[in-house]
Amino acid sequence: MMKKTAIEIFLLNSGSILIRYGLVVILIWIGILKFTQYEAAGIRPLAENSPLFSWTFAFLSTMAFSAILGAIEIATGILIALRPFSPKLSAIGSFAAILTFLTTLTFIITTPGVIEQGLPFPFISASPGQFLIKDLVLLGAALWTAGEALEATQMEGRTRIDVKRALFKYSK
């Protein structure tokens, strides 16, 4: 195997940190916003057109539904952030994020107005189309954090140096 250059090491390590903690920031930030009327009103049209969620409005208000989602997103972000302390909890959070993004990607199919009116596919609307499609990248980040955290669970019980190598596995 060829020795990595300093720039390769820097890009791989910083990229892996940004993938994990960027995902954490997004989940917690959006989760906090779910407790506002603004965000609750924005999520309602997506959820009420989804067979996965439309039934919940029979017994939950828009704010209650949004708050539940917000609590889940905040908890998911916190779990993913715990990777240095508990890879298992981080993996659980990553799997919750995978479910979250797979679910929101179904809105592309169920929400009216995703394809721009009067234009054929692949012309998607700014909202909700482009708003939803970005979840493909977030799903990829969640898949990566799940795999990395599961790999790290194999390191539990090993020495501090082994753990450091696993965290910064792209070093020389």
Image: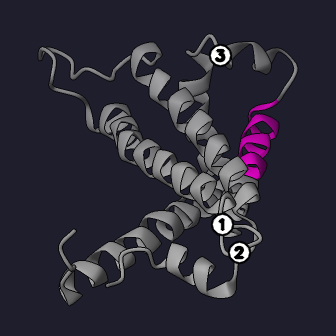
Label 3's element?
A: loop
| Alpha-carbon span between mark 2 and mark 3 | 43 Å
Q: Residue at x 32, y 23 (%)?
A: 114
Residue at 72% x, 42% y is: 69
Q: Position of residue 64 (x, y in %)?
A: 82, 38
Q: Is 9 one of the magenta-colored residues? A: no
What's drawn in magenta, residue-wise?
61-72
Q: Is residue 67 above or below residue 56?
A: below
Disc on res. 155: 1
On screen, 142 above or below 116?
below
Residue 28 in sight here: yes
Q: Which of the marked residues, 2 or 3, is nearer the chain's N terminus? A: 3
Mark 3 neighbour density, 10 Å: few (under 14) some (14–19) many (20 or more): few
Which of the 4 quarters of the picture holds residue 31? bottom right
Cα distance in 3D space between marks 2 and 1? 6 Å
Mark 2 neighbour class, 10 Å CA radius: few under 14, some 14 to 19, many 20 or more: few
Residue at image point 67% right, 75% down: 84
Quadrant location, the C terminus: bottom left
The residue that label 2 is drawn on is 158
Query: Cβ–Cβ below 8 Å for labels 2 and 1?
Result: yes
Q: Residue at x 45, y 42 (%)?
A: 139
Q: Position of residue 126 (x, y in %)?
A: 27, 38
Whichever of callouts 1 and 3 sits on the residue coming sooner in the sequence is 3
- Name the one closer to the observer, 147 or 47: 147
SS of the residue under disc 2: loop
Q: Quadrant of the N terminus?
A: bottom left
Residue 52 marker: 3
